[in-house]
Image (cartoon, coloured by chain):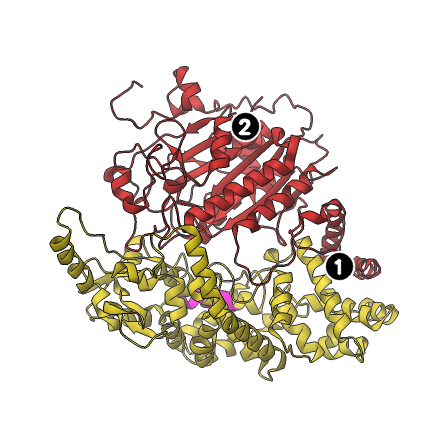
């Protein structure tokens, strides 16, 4: 690795500035050695770490969220969708001289400056086709193919949490129902921000009785009643049922708020998942302003809300923001982008050793693109997931390889993502 | 021209866009509400319940989402105009009617898809060269959204044997499939109806799934749809989805095979496929296999109580509360059709709340024990009967019936 003239070369930003100084420029050096001196090998006490996973459904355009403005092909490919370099009107928020953040992501930019955000670029799950639904399945089932598991990797991770964790069975889906990533044998609660107060206690007691011969219903009702207690002090976090309103940015913030209220409660869940939709920007997605900018602004606001509501717990929290795949590198015929492959991912939170962009940047020249159209992924998202589960939740390497992410030996965990 | 085609919101700042979207929603709100009410009334009162359930199945198979501004007022019209007329007809006819319905075109952006070699693109290039010699004209191009979802979700299924090249080719084939109306150069066709815009269409023969399509214009896409509608992958995909909906979340392979065979042998004549379903012993399992979706739950509750909603608010609030706002699956894959997608603990609590509210409103004058027999027949469990008899009030008994495991399954 040596400096070259281009502002952005393939491996220039592999490790971010800090690690770069150490000269560790090859991807292999970023990865744990294969034998896996797992962070959890010495079995630390059940930790108070919190993990939030935010799923962006619909395929986030990573080239808008984290514009690689210094790539010589970027502006040409993107046309009017290109985000300008920092300093220009409506320009990106500067990260490291090559990548920026979309101007709607002000809170995240502050976190980057505070060393609490890692930006990953040119990432994807092992999925290489372009169906949202299969792509989301692979993102959530932790396998290499869309079918073959009715379980989600985060549920399997809960089962692999260190045995002395008092919180091992406590994850919440902040929604009425449980998304695939959290489905499985480990019990998971769900709680949407809608009001369910004023339930008739006598009716619930009789229902419990009626369900006593049907375990499926019985388990769910018990979980629901326990969760209601947990959220009890949080009536102000609940949303009135909205009438026909579109899934607006405030809705995502309401989810973030409910996640925080539950997690900060006594005995509250260690893990929370919520999702935001509306990223499938095939037409008129806009650049610094427009539809996508509004969505990103909503996400930024939700993460700010999460941080504010978690209060001191934020320092022990990691928030993983992921999407099923990216979008075409070039603008399509309708001022939008079609389904692609590589995108970006974010890891934010007080527990994160941030202020870095981690990317083995493949470039956007025609020959560098996957199938001549998509950002080529150079980092498997499972390498990020495994690192977070290992370093942050202290799940041992063997469980990660054998149970949580089968067939993932090729995706070795990154190292040093979380503060020791 | 481009500017108009893009619905006039290009380049506008976010507040302007939001304001325009609000204004559009206001115009369409009464239509959406009327459609939602009419559907619930039909579900509550029809004496052709199986056909009605099939309508909802197909409407979900060919899902559009009212969450998208352009679709808000149109979502219910696709069900009524493209699904209902063909529910007892040929799949190919339903498929063609759906893909040419303005709600589907708008939902998957096809009105914006332009052939790079189309007349419109060439005209724009010439004009661009004349007027903006220094600045290259904006690129015209295809949008592959509709083409991909037709293959993946409406016909072959994701593993049905097509490639990215087929998606691209199919997208070119259906360039020009658009909606009538518009101003200036865009004027043409009947506003709000399907309209083929010849000048946006990519001309020439095209290769798709290894076959060469020589037809010109609109006929080319229709020929592809006709082939897709009788493809073995389509037969298998439709058979799997029907079996999942009517039999079990994990559809028994013999049922799928039987339905696929009926589909292929009848060239997609749907009554023959339904007959194969009804003839399947697996469809008559002694234990109900399916956990009702919120929609199943609401509609079957209304039917059991023999009540029909009178105001749209009643229906809208119900589905908002239960997490299945009508015509808003959000994604073109439609609402999920398995228990795991609906069985969250929080979702169950919402059902209890809704059942209590419905019971409070309609319990007067009902006999919940008798209602249990009339709506569930031999499926009522003894412990449920006992619980209903011991309930503190008829309101509580009715809520217990609606929330009983046997009522929650089908």
Q: Which residues are magenta?
A: B233-242
Would you identify the image quadrant in which residue B130 lies?
Answer: bottom left
Q: Are marks 1 and 2 on the same chain?
A: yes
Res. A352 mark: 2
Residue B234 is a magenta residue: yes
Q: Is residue B51 above or below residue A230?
A: below
Near-viewer residue (A85 or B240): A85
Q: SS for tag 2?
A: loop
Q: Which chain is red?
A: A
Neighbour tally class for label 2: few under 14, some 14-19, many 20 plus, Cα within 10 Å: many
Examine the rendering and report whether any part of residue B366 can be seen: yes
Q: SS for tag 1?
A: loop
Would you identify the image quadrant in which residue B311 lies?
Answer: bottom right
Q: Measuring from the top left, give residue A321's x and y in whole percent.
A: 50, 40
- Using residue B183 as the reference point, say whether residue B266 is left or right of it: right
- Using residue B232 as the reference point, say whether residue A148 is left or right of it: right
Would you identify the image quadrant in which residue A8 lies?
Answer: top left
- Using residue B391 as the reference point, say whether residue B68 is left or right of it: left
Q: Kindly report the distance in space between the C-alpha atoms of the residues bearing marks 1 and 2.
A: 44 Å
Find disc 1 in the rendering and name its residue.
Answer: A214
User: Secondary structure of the magenta portion, mostly?
Assistant: helix
State which tag comes first along the sequence, 1 or 2.
1
Q: Measuring from the top left, give residue A214's x and y in whole percent.
A: 75, 59
Please give the chain letter of the residue carrying mark 2.
Answer: A
* Closer to viewer: mark 1 or mark 2: 2
Q: Which chain is yellow?
A: B
Name the quarter where the N terminus of chain B is drawn: bottom left
Near-viewer residue (B270 or B399): B399
Tag 1–tag 2 contact (CB < 8 Å): no
Res. A388 mark: none
Name the quarter where the C terminus of chain B is drawn: bottom right
Q: How many marks?
A: 2
């Amino acid at each position: 690795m040596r400096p070259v003239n281009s502002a952005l070369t393939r491996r220039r930003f592999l490790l971010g500035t800090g690690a770069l100084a150490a000269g560790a420029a090859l991807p292999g050096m970023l990865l744990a050695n294969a034998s896996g001196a797992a962070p959890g090998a010495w079995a630390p006490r059940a930790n108070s770490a919190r993990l939030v996973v935010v799923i962006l459904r619909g395929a986030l355009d990573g080239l808008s969220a984290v514009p690689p403005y210094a790539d010589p092909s970027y502006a040409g490919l993107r046309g009017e969708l290109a985000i300008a370099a920092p300093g220009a009107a409506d320009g990106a928020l500067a990260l490291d001289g090559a990548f920026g953040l979309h101007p709607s992501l002000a809170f995240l930019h502050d976190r980057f400056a505070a060393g609490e955000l890692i930006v990953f670029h040119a990432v994807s799950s092992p999925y290489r086709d372009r169906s949202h639904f299969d792509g989301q399945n692979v993102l959530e089932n932790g396998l290499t193919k869309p079918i073959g598991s009715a379980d989600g990797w985060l549920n399997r991770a809960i089962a692999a949490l260190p045995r002395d964790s008092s919180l091992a069975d406590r994850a919440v889906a902040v929604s009425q129902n449980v998304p695939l990533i959290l489905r499985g044998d480990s019990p998971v609660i769900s709680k949407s921000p809608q009001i369910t107060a004023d339930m008739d206690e006598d009716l619930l007691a009789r229902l419990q009785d009626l369900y006593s011969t049907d375990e499926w219903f019985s388990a769910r009702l018990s979980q629901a009643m326990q969760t209601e207690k947990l959220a009890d002090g949080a009536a102000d976090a609940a949303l009135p049922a909205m009438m026909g309103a579109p899934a607006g940015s405030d809705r995502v913030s309401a989810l973030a708020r409910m996640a925080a209220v539950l997690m900060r409660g006594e005995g509250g869940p260690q893990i929370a998942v919520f999702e935001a939709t509306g990223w499938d920007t095939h037409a008129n997605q806009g650049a610094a302003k427009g539809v996508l900018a509004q969505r990103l602004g909503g996400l930024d606001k939700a993460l700010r809300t999460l941080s504010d509501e978690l209060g001191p717990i934020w320092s022990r929290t990691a928030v993983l923001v992921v999407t099923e795949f990216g979008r075409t590198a070039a603008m399509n015929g309708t001022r939008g982008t079609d389904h692609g492959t590589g995108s970006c991912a974010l890891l934010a939170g007080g527990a994160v050793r941030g202020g870095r962009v981690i990317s083995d940047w493949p470039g956007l020249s025609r020959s560098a693109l996957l199938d001549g159209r998509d950002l080529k992924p150079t980092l498997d998202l499972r390498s990020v997931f495994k690192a977070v589960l290992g370093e942050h939740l202290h799940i041992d390497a063997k469980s990660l390889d054998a149970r949580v992410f089968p067939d993932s030996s090729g995706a070795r965990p990154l190292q040093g993502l979380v503060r020791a | 021209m481009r500017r108009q085609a893009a619905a006039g919101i290009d380049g506008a700042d976010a507040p302007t866009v939001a304001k325009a979207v609000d204004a559009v929603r206001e115009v369409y709100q009464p239509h959406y509400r009327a459609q939602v009410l009419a559907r619930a009334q039909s579900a509550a009162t029809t004496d052709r319940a199986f056909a009605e359930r099939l309508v909802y199945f197909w409407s979900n198979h060919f899902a559009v989402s009212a969450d998208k501004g352009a679709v808000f007022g149109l979502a219910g019209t696709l069900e009524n105009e493209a699904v209902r007329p063909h529910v007892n007809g040929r799949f190919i006819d339903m498929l063609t009617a759906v893909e040419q319905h303005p709600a589907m075109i708008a939902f998957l952006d096809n009105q914006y898809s332009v052939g790079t070699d189309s007349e419109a693109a060439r005209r724009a290039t010439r004009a661009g060269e004349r007027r903006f010699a220094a600045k290259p004209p904006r690129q015209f191009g295809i949008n592959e959204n509709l083409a991909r979802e037709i293959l993946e979700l409406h016909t072959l299924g994701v593993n049905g044997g097509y490639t990215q090249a087929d998606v691209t080719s199919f997208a070119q084939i259906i360039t020009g499939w658009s909606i009538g109306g518009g101003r200036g150069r865009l004027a043409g066709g009947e506003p709000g109806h399907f309209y083929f815009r010849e000048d946006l269409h990519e001309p020439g023969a095209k290769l798709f799934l290894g076959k060469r399509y020589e037809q010109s214009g609109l006929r080319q896409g229709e020929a592809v749809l006709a082939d897709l509608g009788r493809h073995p992958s389509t037969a298998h995909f439709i058979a799997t989805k029907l079996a999942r909906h009517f039999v079990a979340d994990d559809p028994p392979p013999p049922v799928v095979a039987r339905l696929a065979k009926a589909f292929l042998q009848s060239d997609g004549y749907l009554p023959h496929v339904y007959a194969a379903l009804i003839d399947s012993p697996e469809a008559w399992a002694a234990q109900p296999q399916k956990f009702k979706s919120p929609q199943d739950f609401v509609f079957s509750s209304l039917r059991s109580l023999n009540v029909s909603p009178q105001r749209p608010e009643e229906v809208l609030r119900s589905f908002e509360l239960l997490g299945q706002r009508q015509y808003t699956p959000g994604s073109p894959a439609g609402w999920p059709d398995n228990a795991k997608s609906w069985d969250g603990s929080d979702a169950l609590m919402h059902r209890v709340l809704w059942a209590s509210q419905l019971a409070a409103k309609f319990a007067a004058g009902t006999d919940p024990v008798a209602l249990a027999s009339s709506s569930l027949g031999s499926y009522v469990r003894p412990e449920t009967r006992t619980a209903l008899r011991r309930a503190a009030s008829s309101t509580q008994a009715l809520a217990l019936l609606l929330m009983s495991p046997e009522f929650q399954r089908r």
